[in-house]
Image: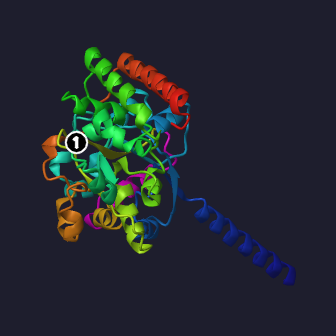
Amino acid sequence: MTKYLINKFVLSIIIVLLSATSFADKDLNVYIGSNYIADPTIARLEASCKCHLVQNYFNDNGEMLAKMAAGATGYNVIVATSYAVTELAKMGKIEPLDLKRLPNLAYVDKDFMSQVYDVGNKYSVPYAYTPVFLAYNADKMKALGITPNTWSVVFDPKYLQKLKGHVTMFNSSRNVFAAALLYLGKDPNSTNLEDLKLAREVIDRASPYWAKFDSDSYYRGLLRGDIWIAMSYSIDIYKAIADAKASHSPIKIEAMLQKEGDMYELDNMVIPTATPNLDLSYAFINNALLTKSEYELSNLTGSSVPNKEAIKMLSLDIAKNPWIYPPDMRKMYVFNEYAPKIRNLINEMWTEIQMRCHAICNTC
């Protein structure tokens, strides 16, 4: 009898341990940019799905696409920018969505639905968007008599002579070529060979004046004061300004959109074909689409969200900030997919630009 009770007790312990292990293994893996989901949203998701959210970060959509093309698996959801959705679909890496399983899609602003890269939202639903513009050291710009409301400031030598060694541009061919095309008065998604050659010439002329190509830590240069103007993401600058205030830094960081127009990265949630748990994938997306979640994302990170009710809940310093919520979306452009031939050409040009920059300044 005693032996039976002992064996029963041991068996109970084993069952408890196995159950605990099973729960701990219920991870929800998301492939996403850093600082792109609010902590309260995570807590609510984990409580509702009885899971643990694991965030896997990437810095650039090219990096994410290369990893997926190489066969990466294990993700429940990927947060991908516009053109990347098309490329993932063509690679067969994401599956069509059952929109009936996403009732919270009703909260999304219709203007952000059914974009050219995914008509009818067959594969993706909007998450948030990030304007790309110029952020700068306000005191330095004032002293130099420069108003950074134009892309000319980072492409025209008449400005760059005053800024040499204190400019950063993204380490992203799409963003830099788009900015050069806007500077030239062209379509930022142009695939016209003459337009692209002209943009290349503009970049070649300007790049010797730039300190480096930097998409990751440029805002730290602004905070230190050695970078005076930088191609920037809104969420990075929102945080940098907050950090500067918190540390009582004498450096005043400001930002503005450019009169020629600006790009914005409209990020979308997609489900990989190899998702380890389809129910968890839909649970994440549905939770992220809640007005409360979108409010938390914008309020805590400065992200721009496609949810009008969430925007109404924000303080005016966020909701009325023109580089977080641009007042004229007609001058804001999303990235379209390049045809393979154009993509290869741009990649070749970009490699040559970076090699030339290394040869000249050894810092880019």
- Against 73, residue 226 (above or below) is below
The picture places residue 184, in percent across and down from the top left corner, at 22, 28
Q: Between residue 9 and residue 290, name the one nearer to us.
A: 290
The picture places residue 209, in percent across and down from the top left corner, at 41, 36
- Against 146, residue 10 (above or below) is below
Q: Answer left or right for 363 relative to 45.
A: right
On the image, which quarter does residue 6 sit in? bottom right
Q: Is residue 300 visible in this depiction of the protein?
A: yes
**Residue ID at (63%, 67%):** 19
Residue 80 falls inside the magenta stretch = no
Spot the residue most to the right. 3
Spot the residue most to the bottom. 2
Q: Look at the image and tell me in which quarter the N terminus lies.
A: bottom right
Q: Between residue 95 and residue 177, name the one nearer to us.
A: 177
- Against 124, residue 87 (above or below) is above
The picture places residue 61, in percent across and down from the top left corner, at 43, 38
**Residue ID at (32%, 28%):** 337
Which stretch did the figure color magenta?
Answer: 274-292
Residue 290 falls inside the magenta stretch = yes
**Secondary structure category for the residue under label 1:** loop
- Which color scheme is applied? rainbow
Q: Is residue 234 visible in this depiction of the protein?
A: no
- Against 32, residue 240 (above or below) is below
**Residue ID at (50%, 40%):** 274
Q: Which residue is mark 1?
A: 150
On the image, which quarter does residue 119 sit in? top left
Mark 1 burial class by Cα count in 10 Å: few <14, some 14-19, many 20+: many
